[in-house]
Image (cartoon, rainbow, N blue to C red):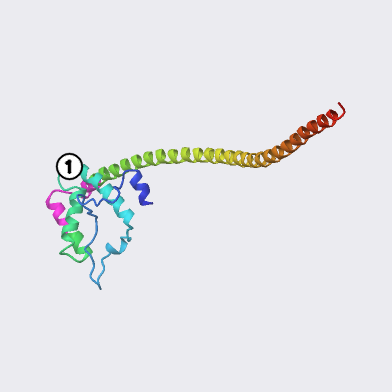
Amino acid sequence: MAKSLLVKLGVLKPSVEDTSVETTEVVSPKPTRRTTSAVSENIPTKTESENEVRKALYKAMKACKKSEEGFGYMALCDALEKMAKVIPNADALYTAVQAMASSMNATAESLTLSSREYIKVLNQERTKFETEMKTLRDQCSNSQVRLEEIKKQIAVLQKEQSGLEEEVSSCGLGAEQDETVFNRVLEEMIQEVKDRVNTVKKYF
């Protein structure tokens, strides 16, 4: 996904760092050089564009957090992020978070229901993005049609230009030749008239 496309669609802002949006993810703590957790091993490396998209989508999810009651999905994300800094083991991390969730009356079912609300938000963002993509594709298609029309017009004009240049060149050369011939014949005829009259005058 090209960053320029994301800028056009309003997902990204060109050359502006969005420092107001957190990038909380459901992740395990960062592994040490020789230690990796089961969760971190399943997290793919993100490109810059992917990270920017993640920020934008997380911002939409965070807006939904305001209506969340109790220990929901976003609270789960926050707890995982904070505890990951002090608990290096994935199993221990999730056990601790589960204990916290239970102490706040959260259940597997309530977390599932909460997560569905955020999935709904993400799907709404997908719908908006697809709508923008369709608009952009239509614009690109229209631009392509217009471009082809302009190319045809340019081809016609170039052909006309070539013909006119040839005509101008031919006309210029021909006109000069015609002028030379005309003036030469004209002077010859003027001289003929004078010579004939002068010859006849001798017989008077």
Q: What residue do we see at 35% from left, 40% from top?
A: 127
Q: Nearer the viewer, residue 82 or 141?
A: 141
Left or right for 171, reference 44: right
**Residue 97: x percent and y percent?**
17, 57
Q: Nearer the viewer, residue 117 or 142?
A: 142
Amino acid under label 1? Lys
Q: Is residue 5 magenta?
A: no
Find the magenta span and give its range: 96-112
**Residue 65: x percent and y percent?**
19, 44
Q: Is residue 99 magenta?
A: yes
Q: What residue do we see at 87% from left, 28% from top?
A: 203
Considering every residue shown, the one lying at the far left of the view is: 103
Q: Is residue 30 above or below residue 17?
A: below
Q: What residue do we see at 55% from left, 40% from top?
A: 154
Q: Is residue 29 above or below residue 116?
A: below
Quarter of the image that includes the C terminus: top right
Q: Nearer the viewer, residue 203 or 39?
A: 203
Q: Nearer the viewer, residue 110 or 72?
A: 72
Find numbered disc 1 in the image and state the secondary structure of the residue it sits on: loop
**Residue 173: x percent and y percent?**
67, 42
**Residue 139: x percent and y percent?**
43, 38
The residue to which callout 1 is attached is 66
Considering every residue shown, the one lying at the far bottom of the view is: 34
Q: Is residue 121 above or below residue 92?
A: above
